[in-house]
Amino acid sequence: MKGIFLIMLSLVGLRAIAQNTFDDPMPRTDMKKDLDLFRNMRAAANSGVYKYRTQEEIDSIYQWAYGAINESNTLGNFYNILCHITDFEGSLHNNTSLPPKVRASFKLEQEGYFPFIVSQIANQWVCNNADVAVPLGSKILQINGQDIQDIISELYKYHHTDGYNVTGKKVILNATFPFFYRMRFGKQATFNITYENPKGNSDIVQLPSVSYKEYMAKQAKRHSSPFDYLNYASTEVLEKKKEVYYSKILNDSTAILVVNSFAIGGNANSPDHKVYAKYLDSIFTNFKKQAIKHLIVDVRYNGGGTDPNDLVTYSFLTNRNFQENIEAWVSFRKIPYWNRIKGEFFFLIKPIAKLIYQKELKKEFPVAKNGKYYQDDTNENHKVWNPAPNAFKGQIYLLVGPAVASAGSMFAAMLASDETTITIGEETQGGYYGHNGHTPIRYQLKHSKIKTAWSIVNLKQDVRNKPNQPYGYGIIPNYKIVQSHQDFLKNEDTVMKFTLDMIEGSNN
């Protein structure tokens, strides 16, 4: 089903003339028409609209949006409004993107960008470049007279997370602050920066803006890159570095399994998945033979991937029977606004694609109930999995962080749900109790040519209720540990050091 649904991302219509840069003017009448369409499409086809928000809250955000249009006059203004709504819904699979020509135009900009990378370290926003006038690690207090926390809250809208989570937003901001600042506050000629250096002394410096190209160079040369590059590494990079997954026995009693992505083959029949499943059986057989008592499972950089890599991994770490999800539904059976479905290239003739899509939708979600369409017990996603014969029996230490999303967070949520697991790190951006996932759908607005996408399947994950785990948030660790400022300067791993110290203490 998921493979067939990918045809939704491979359809296009005729191109029309649109704005070519972020700051090009856009008529308010066109903004209002596109906002009407944006709202109606989401109400008709997005099962996650009311997952974390009430009808009254959604109505209120649109009331704000229509008012904001009256104060707007550019494509960029309108895009910022749509991003705010997209983020408000609360789904990490949401995405609202600019037209390709507009995205490309940023690369040509010769000025206007903030001159260095700003990253959150130990709950403070600090300078993350060593080659600028502001000392590395200095705490940024104000930019052009505006408090840094007020600035950050305005930039959160550009990266979407499940529910009410905000920790996941810092992952993107940590490398892209200058770009988001440019989109929200416009290009600036100079920046007056108030900061506190690592010795605790405050100062103010005025720095000229830089070009997009210079900003990207600062991003590549950020001090933390040797430590945090996994937050941004593609599957291709992970494969080249052989860092998609690996394991190591650290000592007589302790081992570590690192899984940085579940993008390992396309499905259960792919050769890559079969190699991975065989690898897991091999290492867990060896863990049992070596009498390993402590296992660190590190998924801090796992942004998701494909089934059933997450489920096979969990089967080696649990002692219970489980399912991929315990409930899954969509809000439509006939695709609304089919003429606005967009993608990057032709794949099938649209009328044929529509028939195939709707046939598969009816097959996948056959049970109609109260305006929703559910999977039934015959669906593969409701298959009951058993623990693997060589499943680990010792103490598990699950390391999580803000980058954990989608299939990565579903796996981590199930493992964190087990009472024997100790979870360490930071809240994940992927939801603990559920998320919208599996099946992407993408529309294009008529006048702005902005595309907006979401995943249509509303999922309830197979996890137990926990008193420290409120609805609408990511996985809340048993021990919240963030990288310290000192470890940031040395590019050392605070979370791993804490975990190893815990294990050593338990052995004494």
Image (cartoon, rainbow, N blue to C red):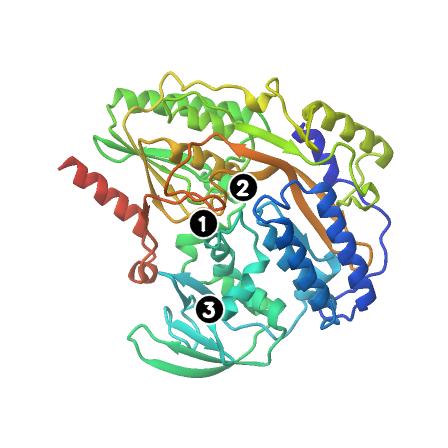
Q: Secondary structure at mark 2?
A: helix
Tell me which amino acid carries mark 3: Gln
Q: Point out which mark residue 149 bears.
A: 3
In the shown orientation, is residue 383 left or right of residue 421? right
For the residues bearing labels 2 and 1, Cβ distance under 8 angstroms: no
Quarter assignment of residue 109: bottom right
Residue 360 at x, y percent in the picture? 73, 26
Which numbered disc flags the more N-terminal residue, 3 or 1? 3
> Disc 3 and disc 1: Cα gap in Å?
19 Å
Query: Measured along the vertical axis of the image, is residue 356 above or below residue 110?
Result: above
Q: Is residue 140 visible?
A: yes
Q: Residues within 10 Å of mark 3 (few under 14, many from 20)?
A: some
Q: Which residue is mark 2?
A: 235
Q: Secondary structure at mark 3?
A: helix
Q: Point out which mark residue 402 bears.
A: 1
| Residue depicted at 78% across the width and 37% down the height | 335
In the shown orientation, is residue 67 left or right of residue 350? left
| Residue depicted at 51% across the width and 62% down the height | 219
Q: Residues within 10 Å of mark 1 (few under 14, many from 20)?
A: many
Q: Give the quadrant of the C terminus.
A: top left
Give the foreground label among 3 and 1: 3
Considering depth in this image, is 59 or 481 the residue closer to the camera?
59
Q: Residues within 10 Å of mark 2 (few under 14, many from 20)?
A: some
| Residue depicted at 77% across the width and 50% down the height | 444
Q: Is residue 261 visible?
A: no
Quarter assignment of residue 132: bottom left
> Disc 2 and disc 1: Cα gap in Å?
18 Å
Task: Tell which residue pokes out farthest to the left in this image.
Answer: 508
Q: Secondary structure at mark 1?
A: loop
| Residue depicted at 40% across the width and 20% down the height | 387
In the shown orientation, is residue 157 left or right of residue 100? left
Query: Measured along the vertical axis of the image, is residue 483 above or below residue 2?
Result: below
